[in-house]
Image (cartoon, helix red, strand yellow):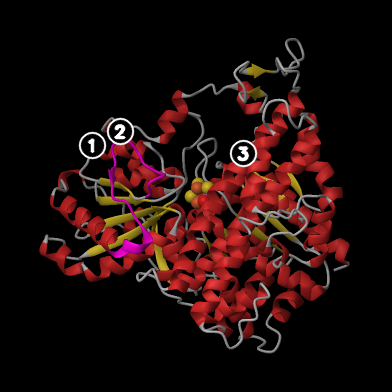
Amino acid sequence: MSKMNKTIDPAVNYLLPLAKKAGLETAWDRYEAMQPQCGFGELGICCRICWKGPCRIDPFGNGPQRGVCGADAHTIVARNLSRMIVAGAAAHSEHGRHVALTLLEVGEGHAPAYQIKDEQKLRDIAEKLNLSPAGKDIKQVAKEVALASLEDFSRQKHSIPCNWAKETMSAERVDKLAKLGVMPHNIDAVITEIMGRTHVGCDADAVNVLLGGLKGALADYTGMYLSTELSDVLFGTPEPVVTAANLGVLKKDAVNIAVHGHNPLLSEIICDVALKMNEEAKKAGAKEGINIVGICCTGNEVMMRRGIPLATNYLSQELAIITGAVDAMVVDVQCIMPAITSLAECFHTQVITTMRENKITGATHIEFHEDSAFDSAKKIVEVAIDAFKRRDNRKVNIPDYKQTAIAGFSAEAIMAALSKVNAKDPLKPLIDNIVNGNIQGIALFAGCNNPQVTQDNNFITIAKELAKNNVLMLATGCGAGAFAKNGLMTQEATEAYAGDSLKAVLTAIGKAAGFNGPLPLVLHMGSCVDNTRAVKVAVAVADNLGVDLDKLPVVASAPEAMAEKAVAIGTWAVALGLPTHIGIVPQIMGSSVVAEFLTEKAKDLLGGYFIVETDPEKAADQLFTAIKERRKGLGI
Ligand code: BF8
């Protein structure tokens, strides 16, 4: 670890030595202190699912090869992986359920803080879900769409797939997945089923357990898809917006409120309320009023819908507090390090938890409910203003680093840009350029940061390599954060790094769409839950070409993956037919059966497969090879 650089983020590199000097601990310090990490855990061969254990398999073959119950390494690894997948699915789909329930409230007229911001999208969704919206009142449509979405959490008939899964994939893919028995019928039931079948003494056939995992991943896909689409209905479908990223977006003379987590239901209202409380902040001495910044995926949500700047991504969330300039860090769900409250004790920063089911010891808890959203948001902003008055300016160290970032490329925004080139058939310019090779393929970057590798480096290295090879790139989650902070979501990056033909296409589309130059090198598609936006574009291309996703030169990469959610996303990407790279060694290597299934057998079964490669340059090569293989298959 000591030889490896911790990060390529200049703001983090500026702050880490200051943190060290002040005796402040960060995730990197804790990671170092944790070395060496447990080898059994790393290989996935530690079983903790009952109290006869923990049992661990000797990977060298000298010691025990079975747990006390007789489960071997393959069963143990497959169970551990499937449980990770459904934990990810649970996190995403709780988010989705929350959004769907709010839409229902709006339809029933009970949630005054929320409106239907994108009526057309709501009607389009209703069409897609076969709800015949024509002539119906918009609130009625909202109710019907919400109920059809909630049906995906309650249907009991196994033979009927989830609405949001069935209606968003190609018919061929639905058929293939149904024949394999992995199409989800009910998100909650699938999560329960997998927890049940991985209980001690149940499913012990590793491949069958993995098929369960695939179903869990597709339940994750379903929950994510509906979450993104319904969020657009409530908060607006993102459109390109020019903003900024990295810790330099904090302001010395403003009340800085960092919104962190994932769920836009709260952060959107905080933004609305904060705008109205600017004068109160000024009265408290903040010359520039209130400055809202984002962290992690809440950051991506408000960045792409409102142009709110992104302060940082996952691994450097603590550094935001170490700037001494964050007055309140308001958190909702997922990817919030519990460490932030003890760190905040060294500053004036108020960490505010907002969800009953997500509290952190040491935080101030202001519970958020949709029906009283304005009141909680107001209270939160008041706490931030109050904290600002206690800010110790001697402790303020805002790194002078920020980059321009163009965000907001929803599937609809991409189609709108393409329609400026060809209004009748917007996909044609994209497809023509893929067919003629100007664009060799499409890569979706997703996932987290992980201290096992230099922060952001894998993302940037792979993207620069693929750019040279004329690959169009999309990004979400902390991958999007990495690109935004490091200047790859700019027109200048296209000029600097794109291969000639990619540059020409991005310039032609950019100019036609009014960008006065090329589109950015990497298109920001949103938060982690928004990965389905990329699927929407890919399925449209596949449908247009009359092929399934596993024939397209489209790949995915999570080069710094960390979370269970990332495991779930990667697995559904494989299930949908994509070659999917991970740059962190997954905790499955203790089972040859599981490793072989995911990296090889999956290819025969699904078309998609995992590529594990920790070296970013080699990973870029392998991703490009997969793209070329797909092109060859299409005869282009
Ligand atoms: O959902 S990319 S570290 S913040 S899990 Fe978390 Fe990973 Fe970031 Fe967003 Ni996704």
Residue nearest the observer in this picture, 355 or 598: 355
- Residue position marked by numbered label 3 in the rendering: 84
- Residue position marked by numbered label 1 in the rendering: 346
Q: Secondary structure at mark 1?
A: loop
Q: Are marks 3 and 1 in contact (CB under 8 Å)?
A: no
Q: Is residue 171 above or below residue 214?
A: below
Pair 2/3: label in front: 3
Dominant secondary-structure state across the stretch colored magenta? loop
Q: Which residues are magenta?
A: 355-374
Distance (Cα) linking label 2 and label 1: 9 Å
Q: Residues within 10 Å of mark 1 (few under 14, many from 20)?
A: some
Residue 74, quarter of picture: top right
User: Closer to the N terminus: mark 3 or mark 1?
Assistant: 3
Residue nearest the observer in this picture, 53 or 408: 53
Disc 3 marks a residue whose amino acid type is Met
Q: Secondary structure at mark 2?
A: loop
User: Closer to the N terminus: mark 2 or mark 3?
Assistant: 2
Q: Residues within 10 Å of mark 2 (few under 14, many from 20)?
A: some
Disc 1 marks a residue whose amino acid type is Cys
Disc 2 marks a residue whose amino acid type is Leu
